[in-house]
Amino acid sequence: MCPRKSKKPTGGPRRRRAGQSAQGVQRRGRVDPHAESEDEPLVRRVLRGSENREAVPDQPTQSELDADVRQGRVIATPAAEFLVEPEAGGEAVRCRLRKSTRVPHPRANPVAVGDVVRYLADGPEPYVVTEVLPRRTRLARLRRAREEQVLAANVDYAIVVATAAEPPFKPRLVDRYLLSVEGGDLHAALVLNKVDLVSPDDVRAMLAPYRRLGLPVFAVSAETGTGLEELARFLEHKTAVFSGQSGVGKSSLLARLTGHEIATNEVYGKVGKGRHTTTSATLYALPGGGAAIDTPGIRSFLLHEPDLASLHSFFPEIATAGAACRFANCRHSGDAGCALPAAVERGDVDEGRLESYRVLRDEVGG
């Protein structure tokens, strides 16, 4: 006779949802309005969501006011814990979120490199973060679920890195990056790396449309050092985030600019795609003052807060040429009466920029 299976005990704490770890719950710093628990009140159950604005007090508690609360800047977010550089100086400390951490941006990731946080410097590390301060600027993208992923916060410049070769120059992707920068109140600059692999004439042709926009543009080579001195002078006393697709050499550039050893990989295969060497954003101090943030390479980039007015401001030459179109709502997609084909023939509009505009306008839907 088979022994009876013992019944599972009842009355214990409710199981976590599938794919939800206790550590993963704590790192979000958000309240789940539908969670239930016999052990703790609703406002203590933490998940992603926007409801924590009502559940978590806006002001510091008395216990916080009586404690040793310090302020610092997040310099790395490798896992559930993250590194914070104290504002008063000294070595970076490990910190973590707690269930009552005040987070003013509920629709984005709670902590990003560059965020300014306040933490309780009591007991052993990791210290507990009591508050994430509002973001002055941000570089962000939208995930497929339309969630905002902030890659870096509180930076002055977004340095969009592209390559002249290996992988090939992709103006459509560069335009997408540059347009997204405008959604985060950032200034943009373009760095074309690996210029030693092509002719000077090719470099000039690649950069000409962006020089006409008035963007700061730099032609550099992390391999030979070409152009790095000029780029370093530009970055002095600024906080900049380096962004671009995998394999463009962001980590190699930052290794030369900062003096830090940063892991790099070669571009692989005939498809010309780079391996993702950097897996999380990291902030590095610059020798001349300021800081630079390395970010993981991104091969797909959904527009952040797409807007037709922003699109037109980013393509001013197309807006100017479009004033001569027969119809005011012309989409410049080859319809009768469109003035853009003639503008391209005259050299007033770059053909590649026009193609980029058409793709992005379809996404905006205007």
Image (cartoon, grey):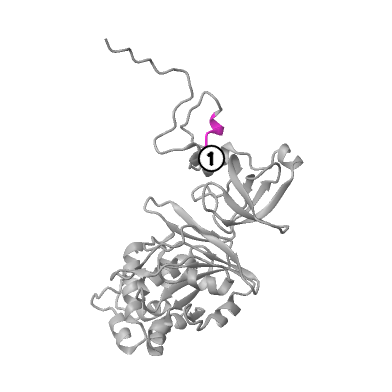
Q: Position of residue 259 (x, y in %)?
A: 58, 71
Residue 53, compared with residue 137, is above or below; it is: above
Report the quarter where the N terminus lies.
top left
Left or right: 20 with respect to 113? left
| Residue reaching furthest to the front | 1
Say which residue label 1 marks.
Answer: 26
Q: Residue at x 41, y 69 (%)?
A: 311
Q: Is residue 47 among the parts visible in the rendering? A: no
Q: Residue at x 28, y 13 (%)?
A: 2
- Asked if residue 43 is among those painted magenta in the image, a careful observer would answer yes
Residue 346, compared with residue 109, is above or below; it is: below
Amino acid of disc 1: Gln
Please report the bounds of the magenta region as a residue range: 42-47
| Residue reaching furthest to the top | 1
Left or right: 64 with respect to 324? right
Pick the residue in front: 47 or 260. Answer: 260
Q: Residue at x 46, y 54 (%)?
A: 148
Q: Position of residue 168 (x, y in %)?
A: 34, 76
Residue 81, compared with residue 16, is above or below; it is: below
Left or right: 238 with respect to 205? right
Report the number of discs: 1
Q: Position of residue 128 (x, y in %)?
A: 63, 43
Residue 331 picture quarter: bottom left
| Residue reaching furthest to the right | 66
Report the quarter where the C terminus lies.
bottom left
Pick the residue in front: 314 or 187. Answer: 187
Dot 1, crowdedness within 10 Å: few (<14), some or many (≥20)?
some
| Residue reaching furthest to the left | 336
